[in-house]
Every structure is written in C-alpha cells, then in structure tokens.
Image: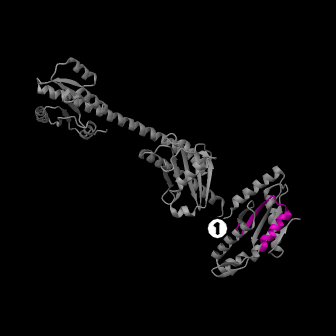
Amino acid sequence: MRYSLVDTEKRLMIIDDETSLLLFLQEYLEQYGLKVFTYEEIPDLENELKKKKPHAILLDIIMPHVSGIDILKEIKKIDQRIPVIMMTGYADETKRIESLRSGAYALLTKPFQSLEELYHTANNAMDHYLESLRTEELNREVEERHKREKMNILELDFLKNLQHMIGETEDPAFVLENASTLLKNFLNFKYFAALLLQDDEANIQVYPNLKENRELLEFIASTLLKTVPHSKRDQLHKVVLQGNIEEAALFDKGNEQAAIVALSTVDKIYGYAGLFREAPFDNEEELIFSRFCAHITHTLEKIRLFNEIKMLSIHDGLTGVFNHAYIIGALESEAERAKRYNAIFSIILLDIDNFKAVNDSCGHLAGDAVLRNLAQLIVKSLRAIDIVGRYGGEEFLVILPETDLEKASVVGEKLRKTIEAENFSYNDNAIQLTISLGITSYHDRKSIQDFIKAVDDNLYRAKADGKNRICYER
C-alpha cells in the first residue's frame, strides 16, 4: 500500500454500535478538518482500509457479537502500522491490558471527560502514523537512489567491458558470451540467448552453452524466431545451434517465461536477444534488459564498422581484391612460412595488354568496369587459398601457396585463355582483352625485392615476346 505525502487530509475511521455517539463524534471532529468515516457494524475491513486509507481508527472495545479486541487483531494483520484507539465504557482492567498487548495505540474511557483530549489523542496518533509513512517513503527514496547509483556504476563497468572487447575481438559471439556473464550482475535469469541475423542466415547462441538437449534448444530457438518478422523469417534457411545444457523441462511450453529485445539501430537489425527462466519477468527487469541490449547493439555496430574500415584498408577500392600494401605483406608472410617449413610457392604477375587503348577508345569509366570484371574473373578462376591483389594500374599479383613452377604455369595458362575467351563489354561496346603473365617460384631467394624483380622480369619478357603469353623460369 503506497501513500502520497502530498495528501495532507487526515482520515479517521470510527467503529461503534452507538448511532448517536457516531454522529456526535463525526460532527465534532470534522470541525478540526478531519475526514471521518463512521461504522455501526463491522465492515469489510480489508476492503475499507484499502479504499478509505485511514490514518487512525477509533474502535469500541465492546461490539455486538464480536470482541473489539478481535477486531483490533484483524486490523493489525491487515496493516500493523495503523494506530487503533480503543474506547470502553467498562472499567475491566483485563480488557484494557489485553487491548494494549494486542497493539492498541491508546485507551479512552466513555463517557469522555474531555472531547479535546479525544481529538488530541486521535490527532497525535494520526501524526505518528503519517510520520511513519514519511519515514518509509524517504527510506524507499534513499534505497531507490542507492539502487540507481549502484546500477549506474555497474552500467559504466558494463560499457567499459564492452568497449574493451572491441579492441580484443571482431567476433560478435565473443561479445554475447561475455555480455551474458556481465548481465548476471543486474538480472536474475537462467539462460541468455541471442539470434544474430546475417543475410539469409541466422546463428543462435545460448549461454550457458547448449549441446545435448535438443528439446530445450529448439524451444529457445523457436521463441527467438517468433520475434523475427515473417518476411525475414521465411528467408532464413540455416539456423546454427551451438551449446550445452542438461535441464529440459524448465519451462512451460504453453507459457513461455522470456524477455525478448531486438538488437537494432535506426537502420539495421542485428538480431534478437532473450532471457529465460522459470518465473515471469516484470516491467522493470524488461526495461533494464532493453537498456543493456542497446549497449550490446552499439558494440556490435562498432565491431561491424571496425571490420568495414579494416576491409577497406586492405582492399582495392575499384576492383575489390587486396590492395598493393596487403598483397606485399601477404607475400612476405608466405615467404617466411616457406623458409620455416621448407615449403614451395609461386607467384604470377599479370598485366592487361594494350589497356591504354581501352581507355582511349571507350573512356576511363569503361576501363574501370573492365578492371572490376577482370579482377572478379581472376578470383573465380583460382582456389580459395590463392591470394589476389592489385599490384598497380592494370597489374595484378597472384600468390599460389603450395604450388611449384610447373603447376603455376598451368594456372597461368588457364588464366590467359580464360581472359582471352571472355567477352567484356561496356555500354554495348564489345571489348576483347588479352593478358601477359610473368611467373616464378620461391626458392630461398635473398629478399622479397629479388623475388618480385624476377617475376617482373618474366612479365617484361612476355610483353617483349609479343604479349598474350606467359613467361617463367625453367
């Protein structure tokens, strides 16, 4: 029962079987500004106390068919704090003592020798009661303030930990797993689950990890999937379930106890997060979870932006393959690996023949389009472990791990024929291309510079020998 401190009207209940006395006391006490409610019979106490919210009660100790002391005890069960002043016309000392033992605030003898004494007794009782309400309200405010301050401190720690994760990982699953641990400081839950959306796929993570209990796993997965819009849900063709769990029948399948929040920014939905337990979540818990999911979302957003920036920093802006700096770094790494494990690898440096003629006849936009299409054609023609980078202008460098010179020449010839057979076009202009290729393999050369010079020399010879051909060391 919450009481407003703004409400200063004092309310008094009087229970007595003497009608004339009730009318008299009501008229007298209301002169002092009190709101008086009178009852000749015992009312529905719980309902009346809840409805009238009295600050004190005057109660006759002798009522028809019931003891006033029993009524006093019943009132105290409902609200221990309400002061009850007992009235009696009998000098039975036993009744007086029993009344006080049962929690009576004071005893008044009828007939009243002084009505002012009655008023002051009732008024003091109401003042004490109101003061206790004020104290309780202030205590609640202090507790709420401390709770908010503690929450704010914990929330700052939560954010600090999430920000720290950005520097440690590029994996959203790592963020979710650690966020689950951090959320334990704020909310009581059994399982934390997240459904991450990417293109036409969904990846569901559950913590603690799920592994063997398919029934519980499917329940959590289906609960999260229900939050996905139908248009998106229909597109999902792959759900990856990971983890480990032992309890199966924790939840009533017909009454799901879950709090679900979208992990979304203004223009992107990363997925949905959920808390699961046996008991329902209240509004405050859902608000806290929602607020912390916003922090998780911002962390996922920063990781996405970080990855995009990283991708842009290592890829050529026009063709989409790796840029010069990255492909040279990859070449150095592969050379170190070859030295350490006595491995072999080869490289191809290829150049478009007469590319200036494409720019001159069809324009630089056509040249750009040709470079993009050529780069993608090269990538599609190679293995997943092969690395392609734009070396400069219309030159591309290809790294072929675990490939000797003979096999590299086969790859080079395949690329040459593929490009020669391809029909490039731009704005209805047919463009035929050929390429020249230099090939060499790594065999403990003194430096990367010598290695690159060797492949560049082979490319130069291919050009000098008439173009549209490969040249490699034998």
**Magenta highlight on residue 252:** no
Residue at screen point 21% across, 24% down: 106
> Against 248, is 38 above or below?
above
If the image is split into quadrants, where does the N terminus sit? top left
**Picture quarter containing residue 125?**
top left
User: What colour scheme governs how the chains and residues are painted in the rendered image of this protein?
Assistant: one colour
Q: Would residue 285 be seen by someone viewing this image from the given angle? A: yes
Q: Is residue 113 left or right of residue 8?
A: left
Q: What residue does disc 1 label?
A: 318
> Which is more toward the observer, 215 or 64?
64
Nearer the observer, 10 or 179: 10
Q: Identify whether 413 is placed above or below 170.
A: below
* Residue 31 appears anywhere in the view: no
Residue farthest toward the front in the current orientation of the protein: 65
The image position of residue 372, as x and y in percent, is 67, 70
Q: Is 403 contained in the magenta span?
A: yes
Using the rendered view, name the quadrant where residue 51 is placed: top left
Residue 235's quadrant in the figure? bottom right
The amino acid type of the residue labelled 1 equals: Leu
Q: Residues within 10 Å of mark 1 (few under 14, many from 20)?
A: few
Residue 20 drawn at (x, y percent) = 10, 33
Report helix, strand or loop for mark 1.
loop
**Frontmost residue, 189 versus 154:** 189
Left or right, 276 with reference to 59: right
Residue 35 placement (x, y as % from top left): 17, 38
Q: Is residue 176 left or right of residue 132?
A: right
For the C terminus, the quadrant is: bottom right
From the viewer's side, name the closer residue of 424 and 249: 249
The stretch of residues the image draws in magenta is 392-417
Seen at 81% across and 59% down, the residue is 451
